[in-house]
Image (tube, coloured by chain):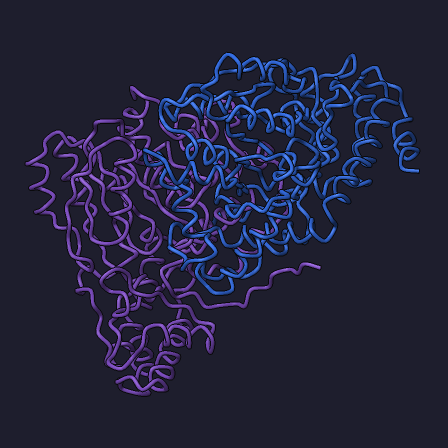
Chain colours: A blue, B purple
Amino acid sequence: MSSSFHPTPRTLMGPGPSDVSPRVLEALGRPTIGHLDPEFIGLMDEIKSLLQYALQTKNALTLPVSAPGSAGMEACFVNLLEPGDSVIVCQNGVFGGRMKENVERCGATAIMVEDDWGKPVSIDKVTAAFTAHPEVKVLAFVHAETSTGVASDAKALCELAAANGALSLVDAVTSVGGINVDLDGWGADAVYSGTQKCLSCVPGISPVSFSDRAVEVINNRQHKVQSWFLDMQLVMGYWGANTKRAYHHTAPVNAMYALHESLVMLKNEGLENAWARHRQHHQALVAGLEAMGLTMLVEKPYRLPQLNLVGLPEGADDGAVRSALLAQYNLEIGAGLGALAGKAWRIGLMGYAANQNNVLLCLSALDNVLSAQGATINRGVAVDAALASYA
Amino acid sequence: MSSSFHPTPRTLMGPGPSDVSPRVLEALGRPTIGHLDPEFIGLMDEIKSLLQYALQTKNALTLPVSAPGSAGMEACFVNLLEPGDSVIVCQNGVFGGRMKENVERCGATAIMVEDDWGKPVSIDKVTAAFTAHPEVKVLAFVHAETSTGVASDAKALCELAAANGALSLVDAVTSVGGINVDLDGWGADAVYSGTQKCLSCVPGISPVSFSDRAVEVINNRQHKVQSWFLDMQLVMGYWGANTKRAYHHTAPVNAMYALHESLVMLKNEGLENAWARHRQHHQALVAGLEAMGLTMLVEKPYRLPQLNLVGLPEGADDGAVRSALLAQYNLEIGAGLGALAGKAWRIGLMGYAANQNNVLLCLSALDNVLSAQGATINRGVAVDAALASYA
């Protein structure tokens, strides 16, 4: 007999997926209905409207792509780009490199603007790139770099794109729900996000939004979009408000229940309250980590509250510490990537996971494991420092 | 305050999604763990092995694509095709047309072999197409046409492809778990399926499998795959058995719990028993429908037990009947498509939905609704005919 799988419950404080709210898990398991059922059509409309709230946009073309964030990224590129186009791609972490791959697979050219991992995108460098390449059609950048915990200035970058007659394409996977994402305020043209970060939902869905200007570009394409599954003209027909819905694919019905519930929770909490909550727990975590003697590796103005890049203390072994946290505390934190591998951890406080219990668990677990493994830290002070931050 | 969504429980006897087993829904809602958690890596290995069982193959590259069946279709085409290639596409329903779209978006040429909707793919026509086009690289066809309820001869078609030096690409979305799908016995080269049909799982995932011959074609491509998300060389790195897993995308963790549970149920029931169960309930349904005076529209040798195409009786209005079934019985059956719109229904008996209760509910509901709406049927005999079929 094959056996059912029963996961050990974990506390997810890595780069995502983050802890999923029990309310979302409960919604996820409700009975499946047909994807053309009138009740499901009504749910789709509510999800679109809730996503507009979460992204602060009136964009009509705002919907969840039925696949993970990397498919959302691809949806943005393949719909906006045609062969021969040029794109400025800002790279200051893992996901800029992935954007370059996407651009090139569209037959377009990626003009790379590179910054060190752990630093934000340089506005000056992007300005220079626009001067050198006035033909650029799209400026693509990551708002909140999940690989480093850095926020870039999305408003300035979107405005720079607009001033140069280009479209802006924003990765907001890790930012939505955790910090201010203001599509209409920024004038962003194409945005993709993920469900498994600050929305506290299960992974697998990617909300996207396109401005009217972006929709006009899509509607005036010379070539068909290379992906049938991600072709927004077809997806619009399925998710569209004003027409009889045309069958495109079968929506992941239960994942939509979960996304809806997570968006309802966000709306009822209020965006500003959600951001304040992330900030509050971030400050407590940082107070504890610094009291322990650990160093935050991102300069304060660019730190993401929801993803904290912290250096390993002397004497700590990356793999051994993370294994012990998982084995002894069922606590997952993230490894460093690229040049930061083995030198830093990424501690997530995303969505439902941004709570006091998680902060205190993480600090006391790190305190114990690092001490037991002989790393150089100030013992027994982290939790008190965090509690003082809350007081 | 925004409100949670509570779907009205339905009985799903349309073309899919089908009724999801309560066991699968319960698995779906288990706590999310990290997609690189050792427990999740173990689950991925089990899923691959269970999929090999379900598809009757030893293909090493057998895994679930993290997106619906239409993305699975696209994964097969974009990985096998390069610009300038030729593909024979068999069309005898909706999904052949979608295959053509996929072929053309790869920069390849689709040579269409068309058969009437409701008929199987003609082996003779495909043979003639190979004779006329010896350069063909891939033969693509639908094993079980969800739009008509017709089974084509997959074994003969795969063998015909091999005999002509072409790869076979099979849509098995509706067939897996309901009728015999025997990849290795057929010598099939690329296959995609769906979770929301006879696997009784939630929609949103597409199992795929590629033969060693297909993998060799993929590994020797001249051009990069146009989709980054669906590039099997990258996906293999994430799902691969023998290497350290390379991060590609974040797997839809909870959907994988559900798929695993549905595959465990299939394995424990046994493939042959599952097929026999579909046949048994199909026969009872047909007995009831025919006793009522309705006509099955697909010739007996080509009928899919899991999807039954039945003509509307005189005096029945398609939309009114389906609306009444949904409103009064919470019962969903499918509409006809294309030339069959308004003239036929598609009644699914897929996976968990293939059970006696569903058959009897569907027959008695149809009996009542059709009578109430003044259609010409033999009243009050359908359920007895079905019960006699079971006896």
The residue under the point 50% across, 27% down is A166
Q: Residue at x 28, y 61 (%)?
A: B337
> Picture quarter containing residue A153?
top right
Question: Does B23 sit above or below residue B390?
Answer: above
Judging depth in this view, the residue of B198 and A100 nearest the camera is A100
A100 left or right of A178? left
In front of the other: B383 or B313: B313
User: Left or right: where does residue A295 sit relative to residue A242?
Assistant: right
Q: Quadrant of residue A327?
A: top right
The foreground one among B165 and B42 is B165
At x 53%, y 54%, the residue is A254
Residue A195, percent from left and from top: 59, 42
Q: Is residue B62 above or below residue A92?
A: below
Q: What x and y, as percent, mark residue B93?
A: 24, 54
Q: Quadrant of the C terminus of chain B?
A: bottom left
Q: Is residue B99 left or right of residue A245?
A: left
| Camera-nearest residue between B277 and B161 | B161
Residue appearing at x 32%, y 83% in the figure: B384
> Please, is residue A311 above or below residue B18 in the view?
above
